[in-house]
């Protein structure tokens, strides 16, 4: 592509004409009051408009009562980004430490030649002692990294806003208000270094703080001050030289940053509009599923509604009531609340009613670690019900895929009148990435087994998909009975006869096979006739895909596949596993998917797992691939 110079941001600020950075990662860390989540969100918002493919994952402490400047209270956000069509890289080349505790917790993640940008105003004796430092790691012989940039952000922010010391005569804002703006000063420095436009941030600030002119003015001053300081103070040891990419927003299409929760909610609202049927989300305030509840409560209307229930069983019961009434009932659940809904899920399977479960996985047992990453609930989703009650289980592979997969899940639930579970992990739901908004005509249509008023069949007579009519209560001449008791095939008549129970078990199993045909085969990328296949599922796709690309550069003939459909498995699953001499199944649990595949199919493979509440590291996966590929069978 022809290289060209682009002047990002406001030309009045003297923005540098710098090119686009290659694939690597930034890590931002600090205390709760340092505004790390807002900082990373705005960086991603601005960078997404410049042609970066971003993947942002926040990490919150599990202990909300942690004291300031302690390791237990550190907030972190990791942003892996790369030009489009290139794999991400999780090596941290830039670490922003807003306090000593954040640096202490993440200093080992920074590469040897990486850049450390620190807020020196937070590195006082008391803060250093809380973090466990005996000496200041930013200066003198104790300096941790030779590319350390120590900036008094609080002082510079105060000067930019008040021009005098906060709290003294003539100050515009209090010290507390000024202190809340220093994350914007740091953001300005980052955007200058990476040659990223500042206009998206300025627009966001204007929209966010339009009702408070003094805060808006202070925010803009702090942000612009950080941008200007990076250029005039010459603080960075070396400014990178890269080339820009073409704009992603072409032909009227818009590229925006979207989180998995935003994408899921947007999909549910689209279902309500597209089908002209009510969609209701019922949930509790249990983390981490509470995050989509907060979004849903603010975005009701156009056929979509939300209700906060007292417990998970009540939430699922409300949802199935909506489905019985002719709408789509949905419930968001996480942790120990998932087993509480098993009775209602079984009822949906027995009565053949659509039900959509958004299940948010978290690390640990019982209360566990609600803010840590894990693929911990696959076993519960597959087998966590009494009897032979099948549940369709899907898993998105990226934050933006939450939109497409939620639409698909709703389509399956409403076409087959079956319960469907979407297994989210925090790498998808809480993370954000750049998303090219799809054209409306490209979105799928929704098909129903039968419309009640047009159907001449009985309430349990099946169509070619083995789905019964979806009859809305109150339809004249279509009175029928639903329940949880076993019944005769194609009939509402309750039956306890062994042959009827066997027929119904076979019917439910056959319907799952029809759903597998509906979902389609599993795609595989990579070398034809590769010697090794890497198989994953859920939010680990970015890391696994990048590790495969690195292993290929080392001379390994490799293929990659990522499951989005976990039950039923793709029809070509056995053929794929038998097509490669070696298979690695990578997942963030004790090897649940590997055990399932080994139970069903014969293949030569190993399980590669991680169970410490963190995501895979590209280099570690790459080494595992190389070692397994070179091992004698």
Image (cartoon, helix red, strand yellow):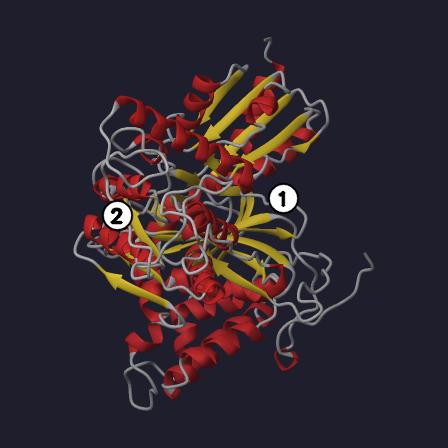
- In terms of sequence position, does the residue under pointer 2 or pointer 1 come before the other? 1
Residue 263 screen position, x and y as percent: 47, 58
For residue 87, the mark is 1
Q: Residue extending furthest top?
A: 632
Res. 439 visible in picture: no
Q: Which residue is mark 2?
A: 481
Q: Quadrant of the C terminus?
A: top right
User: Quick one: quadrant of the N terminus?
Assistant: bottom right
Q: Is residue 212 left or right of residue 343?
A: right
Q: Secondary structure at mark 2?
A: loop
Marks 2/1: CA–CA distance = 53 Å
Relative to residue 621, is residue 363 depicted above or below?
below
- Left or right? Give the position of 122 relative to 250: left
Q: Is residue 235 above or below residue 572?
A: below
Give 581 or 194, whichever is nearer the viewer. 581
Percent of width and height locating residue 29: 40, 54
Label 1 CA crowd tier, 10 Å (few <14, some 14–19, many 20+): many
Residue at (63, 19) in percent of width and height: 580
Nearer to us in this view, 308 or 168: 308
Quadrant of residue 379 within the rendered picture: top left
């Amino acid at each position: 592509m022809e290289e060209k110079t682009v002047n990002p941001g406001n030309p009045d600020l003297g923005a540098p004409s710098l090119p686009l950075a290659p694939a690597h990662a930034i890590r931002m860390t600090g205390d709760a009051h340092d505004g790390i989540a807002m900082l990373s969100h705005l960086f991603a918002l601005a960078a997404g408009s410049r042609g970066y493919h971003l993947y942002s994952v926040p990490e919150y402490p599990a202990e909300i009562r942690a004291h300031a400047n302690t390791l237990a209270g550190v907030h972190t956000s990791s942003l892996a980004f790369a030009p489009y069509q290139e794999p991400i890289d999780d090596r941290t080349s830039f670490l922003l430490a807003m306090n000593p505790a954040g640096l202490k917790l993440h200093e080992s993640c920074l590469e040897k030649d990486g850049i450390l940008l620190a807020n020196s105003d937070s590195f006082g004796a008391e803060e250093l002692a809380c973090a466990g430092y005996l000496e200041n790691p930013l200066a003198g012989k104790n300096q941790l990294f030779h590319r350390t940039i120590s900036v008094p952000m609080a002082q510079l922010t105060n000067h930019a806003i008040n021009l005098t010391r906060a709290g003294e005569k003539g100050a515009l804002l209090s010290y507390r208000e000024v202190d809340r703006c220093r994350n914007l000063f740091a953001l300005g420095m980052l955007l200058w270094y990476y040659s990223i436009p500042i206009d998206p941030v300025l627009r966001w600030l204007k929209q966010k703080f339009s009702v408070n002119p003094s805060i808006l003015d202070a925010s803009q001053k702090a942000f612009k001050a950080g941008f200007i300081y990076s250029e005039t103070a010459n603080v960075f040891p070396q400014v990178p030289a890269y080339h820009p990419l073409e704009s992603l927003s072409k032909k009227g299409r818009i590229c925006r940053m979207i989180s998995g929760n935003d994408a899921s909610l947007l999909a549910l609202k689209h279902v309500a509009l597209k089908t002209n049927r009510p969609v209701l989300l019922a949930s509790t305030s249990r983390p981490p599923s509470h995050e989509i509840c907060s979004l849903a409560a603010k975005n009701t209307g156009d056929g979509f509604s939300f209700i906060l229930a007292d417990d998970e069983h009540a939430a699922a019961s409300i949802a199935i009531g909506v489905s019985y009434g002719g709408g789509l009932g949905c419930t968001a659940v996480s942790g120990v609340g998932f087993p509480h809904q098993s009775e209602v899920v079984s009822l949906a399977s027995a009565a053949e009613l659509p039900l959509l479960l958004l299940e948010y996985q978290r690390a640990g047992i019982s209360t566990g670690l609600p803010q840590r990453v894990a693929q911990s609930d696959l076993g519960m989703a597959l087998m966590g019900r009494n009897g032979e009650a099948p549940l369709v289980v899907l898993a998105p592979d990226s934050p933006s895929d939450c939109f497409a997969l939620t639409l698909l899940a709703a389509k399956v639930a409403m076409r087959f009148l079956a319960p469907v579970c979407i297994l989210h992990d925090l790498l998808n739901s809480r993370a954000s990435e750049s998303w090219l908004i799809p054209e409306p005509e490209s979105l799928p249509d929704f098909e129903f087994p039968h419309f009640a008023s047009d159907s001449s069949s009985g309430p349990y007579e099946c169509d070619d998909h083995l789905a019964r009519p979806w009859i809305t209560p109150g339809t004249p001449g279509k009175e029928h009975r639903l329940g949880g008791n076993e019944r005769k095939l194609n009939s509402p008549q309750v039956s306890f006869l062994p042959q009827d129970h066997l027929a119904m078990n076979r019917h439910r199993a056959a319907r799952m096979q029809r759903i597998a045909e509906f979902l389609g085969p599993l795609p595989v990328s990579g070398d034809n006739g590769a010697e090794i296949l890497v198989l994953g599922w859920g939010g680990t796709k970015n890391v696994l895909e990048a590790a495969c690309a690195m292993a290929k550069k080392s001379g390994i003939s490799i293929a990659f596949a990522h499951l989005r459909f976990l039950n039923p498995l793709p029809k070509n699953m056995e053929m794929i596993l038998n097509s490669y001499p070696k298979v690695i199944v990578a997942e963030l649990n004790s090897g649940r998917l590997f055990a399932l595949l080994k139970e069903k199919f014969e293949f030569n493979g190993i399980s590669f797992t991680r169970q410490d509440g963190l995501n895979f590291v590209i280099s570690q996966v790459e080494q595992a691939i190389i070692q397994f590929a070179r091992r004698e069978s």
